[in-house]
């Protein structure tokens, strides 16, 4: 009977040992799964940060491009206005020169009469 109890106890200890090994194996698997989930979350978060950075960068670039285009257009308008002023000034000079020439011719004609 004593041998039977020892065998039964030994079988029970082996069973407990197997259950403990199984529990430890389950814990290892759970830790591996948790680590994989955490790594996937880290990767997703990093991708989200990169996408957000790219979106902000693109937005800032668009604003800078729009500012450059506006500055360029403003400069073109300013240059056109200056050109128009110069042309108008030249026209006035030419008209004034023609007036003086006509006046001189008129004076010469009068001088020739007398």
Image (spheres, rainbow, N blue to C red):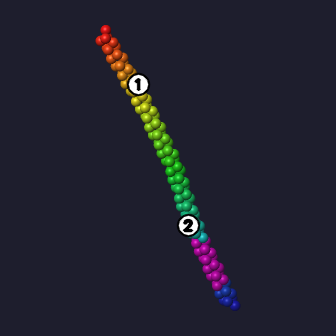
> Foreground residue, 17 or 55?
55
Residue 32 sits in quarter: bottom right
**Is residue 77 visible to the viewer in this orientation of the structure?**
yes
Tell us which disc is closer to us: 1 or 2: 1
SS at mark 2 in the image: helix
Q: Is residue 106 above or below residue 1?
A: above
Q: Is residue 7 above or below residue 49?
A: below
Residue 98: percent from left, percent from top: 36, 22
Determine whether, in the image, residue 102 is placed left or right of residue 3. Answer: left
Badge 1 density bin: few <14, some 14–19, many ≥20, Cα 10 Å? few
Determine whether, in the image, residue 35 is placed left or right of residue 101. Answer: right
Q: Residue at x 55, y 64 (%)?
A: 40
Secondary structure of the magenta portion, mostly?
Answer: helix
Q: Mark 1 or 2 closer to N-term?
A: 2
Q: Is residue 47 above or below residue 76?
A: below
Q: Residue furthest left?
A: 112
> Foreground residue, 35 or 60?
60
**Span highlighted in magenta in the image:** 10-29
Badge 2 density bin: few <14, some 14–19, many ≥20, Cα 10 Å? few
> Foreground residue, 77 or 58?
77
What's the distance in space between the residues labelled 1 and 2, CA to CA? 83 Å
- Label 2 belongs to which residue? 36
Q: Residue at x 39, y 27 (%)?
A: 91
Whether 75 is among the magenta residues is no
């Amino acid at each position: 009977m004593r041998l039977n109890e020892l065998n039964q106890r030994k079988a029970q200890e082996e069973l407990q040992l197997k259950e403990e090994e199984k529990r430890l194996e389950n814990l290892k698997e759970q830790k591996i799964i948790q680590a994989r989930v955490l790594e996937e979350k880290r990767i997703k978060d990093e991708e989200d940060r990169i996408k957000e950075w790219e979106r902000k960068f693109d937005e800032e670039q668009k604003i800078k491009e729009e500012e450059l285009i506006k500055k360029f257009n403003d400069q073109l308008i300013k240059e056109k206005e200056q050109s128009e002023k110069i042309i108008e000034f030249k026209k006035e000079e030419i008209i004034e020169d023609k007036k003086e020439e006509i006046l001189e011719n008129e004076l010469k004609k009068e001088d020739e009469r007398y």
